[in-house]
Image (tube, rainbow, N blue to C red):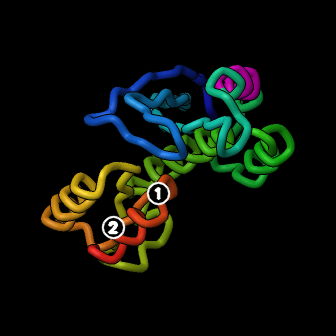
């Protein structure tokens, strides 16, 4: 089944609460999205979260790169994964968020073609899989309160951001 259309867009998503990490506070995150549509109208969706601080890729660079690259996907059979992933490697090697978005959209399409959830398409090996949640840099009280809330909500793995005050960081981790 051939890819007929690619729609690329950016979306700035407001966070429920400000999130602090590495000396900055974020109230929203801007991500890039790609919708790949097949000739039969099946849509695969993928997204990427560019971060200049992490991978050197800005939202605008990622958006423009994926917009330009997506033209290479039109007319390609989505099931020709070797060719698609070779294109990704050769063209998006230095743009991990853009590459991730296309990769996700391809896998979303492939799983939909087989009428399977993505996890079943990939060969589910576990019935359940624990996931973690990250608690940003904040006061001792807020860190402990957030940890309790997340544990009450079923999380068993917590990632705590530290690094502003060593003594307070030790106190937080010890309390948890």
Give the image location of residue 109, x and y in percent. 51, 44
Q: Quadrant of residue 71?
A: top right
- 25 and 141: which one is in front? 141
Residue that carries the numbered disc 1 in the rendered image? 165
Q: Is residue 28 visible?
A: yes
At 76% across and 54% down in the image, what residue appears?
82
Q: Residues within 10 Å of mark 2 (few under 14, many from 20)?
A: some
Q: Nearer the viewer, mark 1 or mark 2?
A: 1
Q: Which residues are magenta?
A: 63-71
Give the image location of residue 28, x and y in percent. 40, 28
Main SS, magenta region, reads: helix
At 25% across and 67% down in the image, what residue appears?
155
Could you tell me which quadrant the C terminus lies in? bottom left
Element on which disc 1 rests: loop
158 in magenta = no
At 54% across and 50% down in the image, what residue appears?
107
Residue that carries the numbered disc 2 in the rendered image? 172
């Amino acid at each position: 089944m051939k890819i007929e259309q690619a729609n690329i867009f950016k979306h700035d998503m407001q966070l429920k609460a400000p999130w602090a990490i590495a000396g900055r506070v974020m109230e929203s995150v801007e991500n890039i999205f790609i919708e790949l549509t097949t000739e039969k109208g099946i849509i695969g969706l993928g997204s990427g979260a560019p971060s200049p601080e992490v991978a050197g890729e800005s939202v605008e660079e990622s958006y423009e790169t994926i917009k330009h690259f997506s033209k290479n996907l039109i007319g390609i059979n989505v099931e020709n994964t070797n060719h698609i992933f070779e294109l990704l490697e050769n063209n998006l090697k230095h743009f991990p968020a853009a590459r991730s978005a296309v990769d996700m959209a391809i896998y979303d399409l492939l799983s939909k073609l087989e009428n399977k959830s993505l996890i079943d398409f990939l060969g589910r090996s576990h019935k359940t899989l624990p996931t973690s949640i990250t608690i940003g840099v904040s006061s001792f009280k807020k860190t402990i309160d957030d940890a309790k809330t997340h544990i009450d909500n079923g999380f068993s793995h917590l990632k705590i951001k530290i690094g502003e005050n060593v003594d307070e960081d030790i106190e937080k981790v010890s309390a948890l």
